[in-house]
Amino acid sequence: MPDMMDEVQRLWHEVRPEADVGPMGVVGRIQRASRLLEQGHRDYFSRFDIDDGEFNVLATIRRYGPPYTVTPGKLTETSYIKAAAITNRVDRLVAKGYVTRETDPDNRRKVRVTLTSSGLDIVERAFDGHVTNEDRMLAALDGEEREQLAGLLRKLLESLGDVPKG
């Protein structure tokens, strides 16, 4: 079934037949899918009075297990988000009472971000529905297609320089 990008490419081909607009279709679809997926996350997390970025911080801390504490550097490293954005998210989560920011008792130059009991509760309450929401957003793809898409996106991300540190 043709989509909006097919029409965009068709129109460009009419006015610039010499141009290879194939990449435009791929990139345009990735961008459109990203916007729609982000909207799906916003809609879901709004019922918890958090946004997807805040959930990402809370979930990252939760993934590391007890005592549910990490450095801001670890948050930056594992979320591929700039330090300034992490700082802003942590500030909002501190204001909401979901995390604390404290000096590391073993090294006063380091800061640790720790889930509060309220923060742990919100992650636990939101997590299962989050997984279900993502499954719903990918419902058009079967398991094999999801694996194939994940592999292709991984390859693209690596080619663009998005590789794990270390």
Image: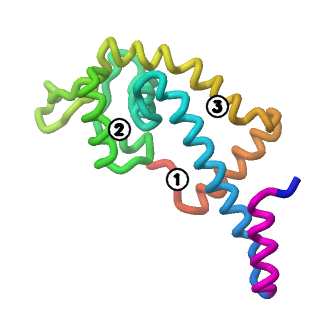
Q: Nearer the viewer, residue 89 or 51?
A: 51
Query: Which image quarter: residue 24?
Result: bottom right
Mark 3 or 1: the one toward you: 3
Q: Marks 3 and 2, how far apart in space?
A: 25 Å
Would you say 91 lies left or right of 128 here?
left
Q: Marks 3 and 1, how far apart in space?
A: 23 Å
Residue 130 image offset from top left, x and y in percent? 57, 25
Q: Which residue is mark 2?
A: 74
Residue 25 is inside the magenta segment: no
Q: Nearer the viewer, residue 132 or 143?
A: 132
Residue 4 is inside the magenta segment: yes
Q: Which mark is residue 50?
A: none
Q: How many marks?
A: 3
Q: Secondary structure at mark 2?
A: helix
Mark 3 is on which residue type? Glu
Circle 3 crowding by C-alpha within 10 Å: few under 14, some 14–19, many from 20? some
Instruction: Give the residues drawn in magenta, as a range.
Output: 3-17
Mark 2 is on which residue type? Lys
Q: Secondary structure at mark 1?
A: loop
Compared to residue 13, the image places residue 55 above or below, namely above
Q: Marks 2 and 1, how far apart in space?
A: 16 Å
Would you say 30 lies left or right of 57 here?
right
Q: Which residue is mark 3?
A: 134
Mark 3 or 2: the one toward you: 3
Query: Which image quarter: residue 128?
Result: top right
Would you say 19 lies left or right of 119 here?
right
Q: Nearer the viewer, residue 102 or 124?
A: 124
- Which residue occupies 33% across, 14% down? 118
Q: Which residue is mark 1?
A: 163
Would you say 30 lies left or right of 124 here?
right
**Which of disc 1 and disc 2 is earlier in sequence?**
2
Circle 2 crowding by C-alpha within 10 Å: few under 14, some 14–19, many from 20? some
